[in-house]
Amino acid sequence: MSDILIFGDTIRSQELRHEVPLMIPDAFLYVERDGVRHLTCSSLEEPRLAELDGFVFHPFEEFGLDELRRTTSSRVDMIDEIVVRAAGALGVSQALVPASFPVLTADRLRAAGVALSADQPVFDGRRRVKTALELAGVRRAQAAAEAGMAAARELLAAAVPGGGILTLEGRPLTSERLKTAIAGAFLEHGANAEEFVVSHGPQAAIGHHLGEGEIRAGETIVIDLWPGDNASACFADMTRTFVVGEILEEVAEWHRLCKEALERALAEVRPGVTGRALFDGTCELFEAAGYPTQRTKTDGETLARGFMHSLGHGVGLAVHEEPFLALNGHAPLVAGDVIAIEPGLYRPGFGGLRLEDLVLVSENGAERLTSFSYELTP
């Protein structure tokens, strides 16, 4: 079994947060050798780390912190030297590291004779099956997402079409007003998001356009939310589409097809099924209805209408992670995967419609983690 090295903090390194389920803002070293897990970290973190089972803790002082404070002017050089000394003391001569491993630290280790190999699939695989703490965090994040969606739906339901523009309490209803309500719901549920999508009309046909400005009656309003749970750093992901006013026949067809695609994919989710197989099922449905997909476009063509993206992706400590439900989604699903399934249809200059649910792959099939209705009318 190869030794494992991860160096970073648990805010930016999903690989490290998976192994050490605490928020630690300063970089530290994780070493896995001969089945023993070692943490080389600031002594400030020792009381919290001591509450976790299964680790051997090594404070920076064990590897000469006090001496290095007197002789090294650069904190980066000081911590990198501690990493080199710790790896040597623990007998690490070669190890696997994630793609995010810092280049400067890797150079220092290699110069000291430690052979490092970046192998991101190994680390992606370690995170596929969610721990109990991670799954609980995903569920809390999903509850926050649904609270945010409900807050947006409530405002849309109270909006009044007038002169083509939706108004609420005498003022135009905008993406920004909806986002404020959604963000407030996230905070009330112990979650947050730096950004999310509340796009409408032509904006909704443009990839991840975040949305802005006044919302018009009759246009599609795509709300795509991916809040992160504060306690676990795990995410959820869900999308719903609304229309206030007349629902055009084209939009009604999109909604029918996307809901059918979502239900078909959900029925097919089980361990052993590949992401590509789920993607193909959705493409077959949309292609039969006359819409282009990634399967039907020519090489080099950019697709701006129809079903122009993948069917979904894994969700956990990152919003987008393995496995991917796409043309190159060859990895079989495993029990413990959490995946987002998001069929959508789009027409440039007009709008788009997307539905997205979060699903836990179980031993016998799937558990839908999303319980929000699909109704177009708020």
Image (tube, rainbow, N blue to C red):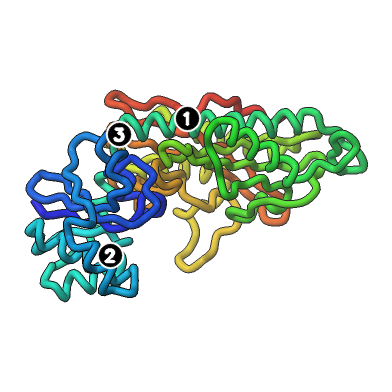
Would residue 63 be found to the left or right of residue 178 on screen? left
- Disc tally is 3
The amino acid at mark 3 is: Thr
Q: Which residue is at 45% across, 53% downward? A: 295
Q: Which residue is mark 2?
A: 79
Q: CA distance from mark 3 to mark 2?
A: 30 Å
With respect to residue 286, does 213 lie above or below? below
Q: Quadrant of the C terminus?
A: top right
Q: Amino acid at mark 1?
A: Arg
Label 2 to label 1: alpha-carbon separation: 35 Å
The crowd level at tag 2 (other Cα within 10 Å; few <14, some 14-19, many 20+) is many
Name the residue located 33 percent from the left edge and 36 percent from the top edge. 337
Q: Which mark is residue 109?
A: none
Q: Which is more toward the observer, 352 or 102?
A: 102
User: Going 36% across and 43% down the picture, which residue do you hit?
Assistant: 275
Give the CA distance from mark 3 to mark 1.
Answer: 14 Å
Other residues around mark 1 within 10 Å, as few (<14) / some (14–19) / many (≥20): many
Counting residues from the start of the chain, the first of labels 3 and 1 encountered is 3
Q: Which mark is residue 131?
A: 3
Q: Residue at x 54, y 64 (%)?
A: 302
| Residue at disc 1, secondary structure | helix
Q: Out of 222 and 296, give the one closest to the viewer.
A: 222
Point out residue 2 in the picture as x, y percentages from the top left corner.
Answer: 11, 54
Q: Which residue is mark 1?
A: 140
- Quick check: 58 left or right of 257? left
Can residue 281 be seen here? The reply is no
**Residue depth check, mark 2 versus mark 1: number of the one nearer the observer:** 2
For the residue pair 140 and 370, the one nearer the viewer reads as 140
